Image (tube, rainbow, N blue to C red):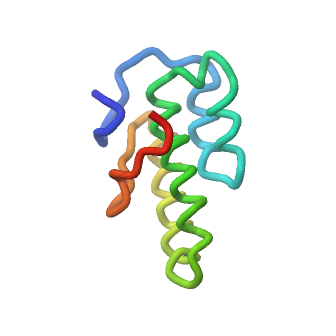
């Protein structure tokens, strides 16, 4: 499946891909998945890094972002732990990392 779809990821993953995908939802740890090879080229990691960046931006919005951002992050962490790609609800069309 492509990186824009929700569902299981069927491609090759490195040993750290799942870890970097989970960490991408926690603060600035999305930088790890964005900068460290070979994981930075993995569509699975890039999907979750993009979502992590968007969640970080959303969390900066007063009140609504403070509630919605962590909910999106928890949803993303669960999907990354299950080795699934994930599209954020409502803001899933925002692509920062391609």
Pinpoint residue 47: horizontal percent, then vertical percent.
Answer: 45, 37
Q: Quadrant of residue 33?
A: top right
Quarter of the image containing the C terminus? top left
For the N terminus, the image quarter is top left
Give left or right: position of 14 versus 88.
right
Residue 75 horizontal side relative to residue 23, left or right: left
**Residue displayed at 51% across by 55% down:** 54
Answer above or below: position of 70 versus 37: below
Give how far across and how far down residue 93 sits, in percent.
Answer: 33, 51
Image check: 76 left or right of 85? Answer: right
x and y percentages locating residue 31 in the rendered image: 69, 39
Q: Is residue 1 above or below residue 90?
A: above
Task: Identify the residue at image location x=55%, y=41%.
Answer: 49
Name the residue rendered at 71%, 45% in the picture: 29
Vertical order, 61 against 58 (above or below): below
Q: Residue furthest bottom?
A: 63
Query: How many numbered marks are there?
Result: 0
Q: Name which quarter of the figure residue 39 lies in.
A: top right
Residue 37 vs residue 78, the one in the foreground? 37
Q: State the image coordinates of residue 52 (x, y, percent, origin top left).
A: 56, 50
């Amino acid at each position: 499946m492509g990186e824009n779809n929700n569902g299981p990821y069927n491609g090759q993953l490195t040993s750290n891909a799942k870890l970097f995908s989970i960490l991408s939802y926690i603060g600035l740890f999305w930088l790890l998945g964005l900068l460290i090879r070979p994981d930075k080229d993995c569509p699975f990691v890039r999907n979750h890094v993009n979502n992590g960046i968007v969640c970080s931006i959303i969390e900066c919005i007063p009140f609504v972002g403070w509630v919605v951002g962590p909910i999106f992050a928890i949803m993303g962490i669960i999907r990354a732990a299950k080795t699934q790609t994930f599209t954020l609800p409502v803001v899933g069309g925002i692509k920062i990392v391609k």
